[in-house]
Image (cartoon, rainbow, N blue to C red):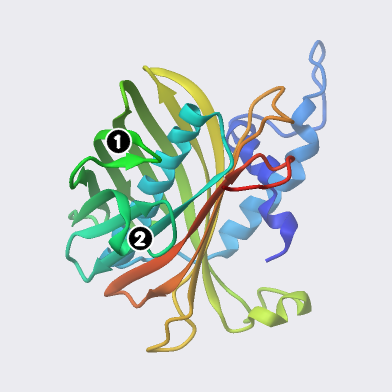
């Protein structure tokens, strides 16, 4: 997919811009909107999504992606504790068929035996084809880099067809209460079939799932940070292969934060075949305009 289709700044303002007019014409007494230059980016997002296909994720995929979101939301909240200190985490997510899924968060990759925080998720499909996912902490003394994770409880919802994901969670990091809220759009894209040009030949006949959305982190009941989010999700290329990929990019957006913006990058490998969801990868946290030294 072309880079311009995934313009982080455009997506950051996409929801807000979509709520109003994108017309260049100014009514009497109204100045030009400073964000209007991003209108083309918003139009691109809308065009691509309307060309996309409904994902129709299976239960295991809904559970696994919800666990990824819960894990990265916890890590996003943790940056409020560390002031976005450059560091890394390992995140492994495993779901077997319709059984409860487990996310393991640790200080390194391959967190199966070295997790410091564990999340468990159960998914219930409702009558109209939507789904509700309940996520909670379990295990002894869950923590992120030594900061206790206390009573995480997430309640997430999928629309019928899995095109809309809404999530919310409440938890504490140490003594500080946090909440998290987000909404995201998912869609599938089949490369080829007349949908993309020659610059995407590398991905011909592949199907990828994408999402974009916004997240808010609340600290002691007050919103303190807004994050944009993009993700790339490929289940696998051929049957019985384990060459799936998952990438999530989250970045804070707020006025006067050009230097202090915080970025979260998760890249994982694994597979998902509709019955299982197994991905293992590394989370990097850094200031995007400062050289990375994640130690």
Mark pair 1, 2: CA separation: 17 Å
**Residue 107: x %, y % from top left:** 42, 51
User: Local crowd at mark 1 within 10 Å, few (<14), some, or many (≥20)?
Assistant: many
Mark 2 Cα shell of 10 Å, populated few (<14), some (14-19), many (≥20): many
Counting from the top left corner in percent of width and height, residue 251 is at: 60, 41
Q: Can you say whether 256 is above or below 132 in the image?
A: above
Q: Where residue 216 appears, x then y in whole percent? A: 47, 31
Q: Looking at the image, is 98 positioned above or below residue 14? A: below
Q: Name the residue: 81% across, 32% down.
A: 24
- Name the element at disc 1: strand
Q: Say whether residue 217 is visible.
A: yes
Mark 1 lies on residue:
149
The residue lying at 62 percent from left, 43 percent from top is: 286
Image position, residue 49 (x, y; %)? 57, 57
Q: Look at mark 2 in the image and give the residue it sits on.
A: 111
Q: Which of 200/56 is in front?
A: 200
Query: In the displayed structure, does residue 93 sit left or right of residue 230?
Result: left
What's the residue at 23%, 53% (across, down)?
A: 121
Q: Point out the image quarter for the N terminus.
A: bottom right
In this rendering, is residue 171 above or below 223? below
Q: Secondary structure at mark 2?
A: helix
Is any part of residue 55 visible from this angle? Answer: no
């Amino acid at each position: 997919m072309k880079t311009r289709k995934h313009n982080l700044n455009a997506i950051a303002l996409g929801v807000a811009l979509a709520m109003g007019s994108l017309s260049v014409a100014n009514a009497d007494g109204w100045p030009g909107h400073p964000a209007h230059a991003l209108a083309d980016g918003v139009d691109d997002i809308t065009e691509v999504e309307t060309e996309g296909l409904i994902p129709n994720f299976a239960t295991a995929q809904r559970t696994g992606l919800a666990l990824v979101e819960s894990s990265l939301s916890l890590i996003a909240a943790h940056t409020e504790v560390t002031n976005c200190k450059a560091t890394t985490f390992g995140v492994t997510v495993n779901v077997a068929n319709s059984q409860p899924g487990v996310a393991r968060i640790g200080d390194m990759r391959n967190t199966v035996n070295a997790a410091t925080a564990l999340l468990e998720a159960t998914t219930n499909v409702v009558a109209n084809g939507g789904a509700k996912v309940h996520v909670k902490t379990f295990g002894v003394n869950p923590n992120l880099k030594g900061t206790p994770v206390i009573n995480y409880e997430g309640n997430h919802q999928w629309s019928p067809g899995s095109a809309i994901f809404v999530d919310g969670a409440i938890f504490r990091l140490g003594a500080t209460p946090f909440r998290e809220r987000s909404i995201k759009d998912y869609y599938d894209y089949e490369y080829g079939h007349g949908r993309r040009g020659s610059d995407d030949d590398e991905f011909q006949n592949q199907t990828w799932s994408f999402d974009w959305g916004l997240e808010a982190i609340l600290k002691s009941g007050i919103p303190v940070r807004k994050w944009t989010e993009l993700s790339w999700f490929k289940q696998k290329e051929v049957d019985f292969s384990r060459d799936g990929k998952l990438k999530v990019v989250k970045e804070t957006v707020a006025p006067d934060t050009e230097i202090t913006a915080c970025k979260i990058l998760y890249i994982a490998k694994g597979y998902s075949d509709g019955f299982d969801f197994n991905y293992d990868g590394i989370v990097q946290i850094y200031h995007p305009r400062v050289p990375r030294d994640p130690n």
